[in-house]
Amino acid sequence: PNTIHLAFNSIENFISKDPDVIKSTKEYFIQQNNSIKVNNIYQAFYPLDVRVNFEHGKFSVDGMLRKNTGNVFISEERKVIEFDFIVENGRLIIKKFGVK
């Protein structure tokens, strides 16, 4: 919970500079931040599989999201994070993402 605010900073350079993309990404992280702080949750995502579709500019990461509070296990569930991307001048830029 004490470092959740750093999550957006760690990926900010990979996010599109489109104001709508920045806004929706920040809103997602604010929502996650509030939930984590209110519930005193620690969570970790463990990637299991990555699929890339260069032709359509998409990739997805399948994995397990494990939630704990202190040393107490809360839940573990399979999640898929889907990304739309472009590569511009050799740089990966995320245009959109969603968690299912």
Image (cartoon, helix red, strand yellow):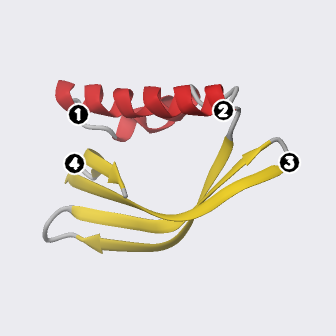
- Disc 4 versus disc 1: distance between alpha carbons? 20 Å
Residue 43 horizontal side relative to residue 35, left or right: right
Residue 18 at least partly seen: no
In the drawing, what numbered circle is on residue 71? 3
Q: Nearer the viewer, residue 40 or 7?
A: 40
Q: Nearer the viewer, residue 13 or 41?
A: 41
Q: Residue at x 23, y 30 (%)?
A: 17
Query: Looking at the image, is mark 3 or mark 2 earlier in the sequence?
Result: 2
- Disc 1 versus disc 2: distance between alpha carbons? 27 Å
Amino acid on which the number 3 mark rests in the picture = Asn
- Disc 3 versus disc 2: distance between alpha carbons? 14 Å
Q: Nearer the viewer, residue 84 or 17?
A: 84
The residue at which mark 2 appears reads as 39
Dot 3, crowdedness within 10 Å: few (<14), some or many (≥20)?
A: few
Query: Looking at the image, is mark 2 or mark 4 earlier in the sequence?
Result: 2
Amino acid on which the number 4 mark rests in the picture = Asn
